[in-house]
Image: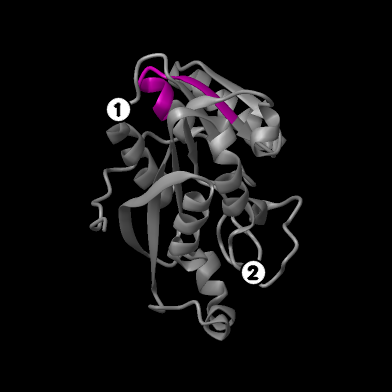
């Protein structure tokens, strides 16, 4: 079982316009796992749901050839600009997860997808909530990424995904194992609730999702393709 990970200082500030997820604790936790992974020079990395491009830029700095994908045109433009400002080469694609890179496979897939449980089943099609709302169980995107990972990865390829313990860490591990991957939690951090979760406290209580009414556990899960 992973012990709690000490978060490194925040990376250099990136452009994050309204409607694009601003890098936070989960981004930093996943960036640390990415750096520890030891990306081989010229390895091909796919960043799903890139947002500002923070993880894509981090992978490019490690020497990887990076493709970043987002369904939001605003995020696509933001990631492109941030990569240029950072002096890193990142191919940014518009599309819905792996459908943006049909037929391609990668050495490493990283993702910080929307994962916040929402009182509404339907996923938002626009607005800032699109960057975090993920259905009533928070798994609308997480499950799709788990299912797509085996075909997106080369043999011995690795998926690194971060999400909240509120959307059921064990369910993610089980889904990845069912897909034929070896999965484990490598990093954990306990962080204060942000404004979105604080605004949903009554609903979260009714759903029985709260272990602590002010703190949230965020985990990084590593899964390796056979």
Tell me if residue 11 is in the magenta stretch: no
Q: Say which residue appears at 39% left-offset and 75% top-offset.
A: 214
**Figure check: 5 above or below 116:** above
Q: Position of residue 158 (x, y in %)?
A: 42, 35
Residue at (57% x, 29% y) in the render = 68
The quarter of the picture where the C terminus appears is top left
Q: Which residue is mark 1?
A: 38
The one nearer the camera, 185 or 60, is: 185
Q: Label 2's element?
A: loop
* 69 left or right of 159 in image: right
Q: Is residue 63 magenta?
A: yes
Secondary structure, mark 1, is loop
Q: Nearer the viewer, residue 34 or 155?
A: 155
Residue 12 found in image quarter: top left
Quadrant of the image occupied by residue 133: bottom right
- Give, as a single range, the part of the protein colored magenta: 58-68
Real-space Cα separation, disc 2 to disc 1, in angstroms: 35 Å
Residue bearing the label numbered 2: 136
Q: Position of residue 193 (x, y in %)?
A: 43, 67
Q: Quadrant of residue 105?
A: top right
The N terminus - image quarter? bottom left
Residue 199 placement (x, y as % from top left): 56, 73
Residue 74 drawn above or below residue 206: above
The residue positioned 28% from the left and 35% from the top of the image is: 36
Q: Residues within 10 Å of mark 1 (few under 14, many from 20)?
A: few
- Whether pointer 2 and pointer 1 mark residues with C-beta atoms closer than 8 Å, the reply is no
């Amino acid at each position: 079982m992973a012990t709690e990970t000490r978060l490194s200082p925040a990376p250099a500030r990136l452009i994050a316009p309204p409607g694009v997820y601003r890098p936070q604790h989960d981004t930093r936790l996943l960036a640390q796992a990415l750096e520890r992974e030891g990306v081989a020079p010229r390895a091909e990395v796919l960043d799903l749901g890139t947002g500002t491009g923070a993880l894509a830029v981090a992978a490019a700095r490690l020497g990887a050839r990076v493709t970043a994908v987002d369904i939001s045109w605003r995020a696509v433009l933001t990631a492109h600009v941030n990569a240029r400002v950072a002096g890193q080469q990142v191919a940014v694609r518009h599309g819905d997860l792996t459908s943006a890179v049909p037929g391609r496979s990668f050495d490493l897939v990283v993702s910080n997808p929307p994962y916040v449980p929402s009182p509404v089943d339907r996923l938002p099609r626009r607005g800032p909530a699109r960057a975090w709302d993920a259905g009533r169980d928070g798994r609308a995107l997480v499950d799709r990424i788990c299912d797509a990972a085996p075909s997106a990865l080369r043999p011995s390829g690795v998926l690194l995904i971060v999400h909240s313990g509120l959307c059921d860490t064990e369910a993610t591990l089980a889904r990845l194992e069912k897909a034929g991957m070896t999965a484990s939690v490598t990093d954990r951090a306990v962080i204060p609730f942000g404004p979105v979760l604080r605004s949903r406290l009554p609903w979260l209580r009714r759903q029985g999702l709260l272990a602590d009414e002010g703190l949230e556990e965020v985990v990084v899960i590593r899964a390796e393709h056979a």
